[in-house]
Image: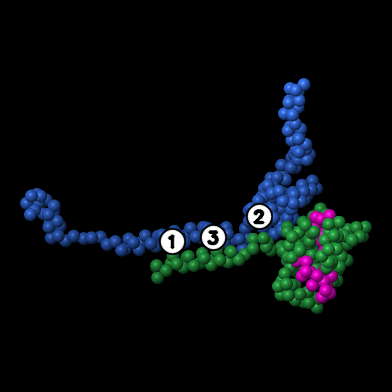
Chain colours: A blue, B green
Amino acid sequence: MKHLLILLICLLPTFSYAGEAKDLAEDPVLEKRMVGLAEKLRCLVCQNESLASSRSELANDLRREVREQMNKGKSDQEIIDYLVSKYGDFVLFDPPMKRYTLLLWYGPFALLLIGLVGLVIQLRKRKNEISEASLSDEDAKRASAMLNTPKDSQT
Amino acid sequence: MMRFWPFLVFMVLAIFLYVGLGLNPHEVPSPLINKPAPAFSLSQLHDPAKQFSSQDMKGKVWLLNVWASWCVSCREEHPILMDLARRNVLPIIGLDYKDKNEDGEAWLRNGGDPYTLVATDKEGRVGIDYGVYGVPETYLIDKQGVIRYKQIGAVTHQSLQEKILPLIAELQAK
């Protein structure tokens, strides 16, 4: 009797899990599609979280909205367009290429280019500054004479 | 000249960062400005059997104020709406967002009711249509039913005096 009771208690969590998952399991394919789309969308309340991971009320409502629109047979793009028309490009984690986002997309490359040009200019300039040291014949002779003189006779 | 470059770069960076500090990341420009206000029909707070339809407001300049009894900033905004209501310049329609009717009614009984009429959006669907992501939000809608201004967060004395009131006068004169 006691063992049976323990066994039952151990099984309790599995029951509660099944209860919770029921809602999501209603249509697992749709749910997966919804989560896939929601991961690309920003939660407006907690701005660094995606719509898929946020627990805010608004995210809940928006997930419901996405689910409903999917049920109505709308494509992912149509749903994204709908949300952008309401909340602006800000709901997209991937900002679209537009006139005012050009700097965002190409800015880093422009900076890289500026850096490279700067580096080349700097290197060229340095090359000019370092002049080849030339040695006249006389100096060369003196130098080799000094180098070849035995150590004890130098003084 | 060359040695001033790092300083110049630093200054540009500093200016960008300084400007960035002054921006509020929660103020997302609404794409709905100058677009037709989404039509809706919802039951009224004080008389749930009756409907309020946004179509009824055609031909009038009106204010749509999204609020809720659970919203903290709405308390801050409330006296300013009361002030606007006393001026009697335009109908103020309240949208009680994701709230219980009894809570909303109690809130208005206690604090005063600045609204011409209050509609209830219990499930937040109209909110989504209007791109509401933080309560309070306020929309100024013109005679043709086009959204002309959106205030994100509480209406302040400053925004009322400097933006909303002049815009109301301008839109009503049209």
Quadrant of the rendering where the C terminus of chain A is positioned? bottom left
How many marks on residues?
A: 3
The residue sitting at the bottom extreme is: B173
**Residue A16, image x and y in percent?**
76, 35
CA distance for labels 2 and 3: 23 Å
Earlier sequence position, callout 3 versus callout 1? 3
Residue occupying image coordinates x 55% and y 64%? B17
- To which residue does mark 2 refer? A47
Q: Dot 2 falls on which chain?
A: A
- Residue type at mark 2 is Gln
Q: Residues within 10 Å of mark 3 (few under 14, many from 20)?
A: few
Q: Are marks 2 and 3 on the same chain?
A: yes
SS for tag 3? helix
Q: Nearer the viewer, residue A74 or A41?
A: A41
Disc number at residue A117?
A: 1
Q: Dot 1 falls on which chain?
A: A
Q: Are marks 2 and 3 in contact (CB under 8 Å)?
A: no
CA distance for labels 3 and 1: 15 Å
Q: Is residue B62 magenta?
A: no
Where are the magenta residues, as a range? B77-100
Quadrant of the rendering where the N terminus of chain A is positioned? top right
**Residue A60, image x and y in percent?**
74, 49
SS for tag 1? helix
- To which residue does mark 3 refer? A107
Q: Nearer the viewer, mark 1 or mark 2?
A: 2
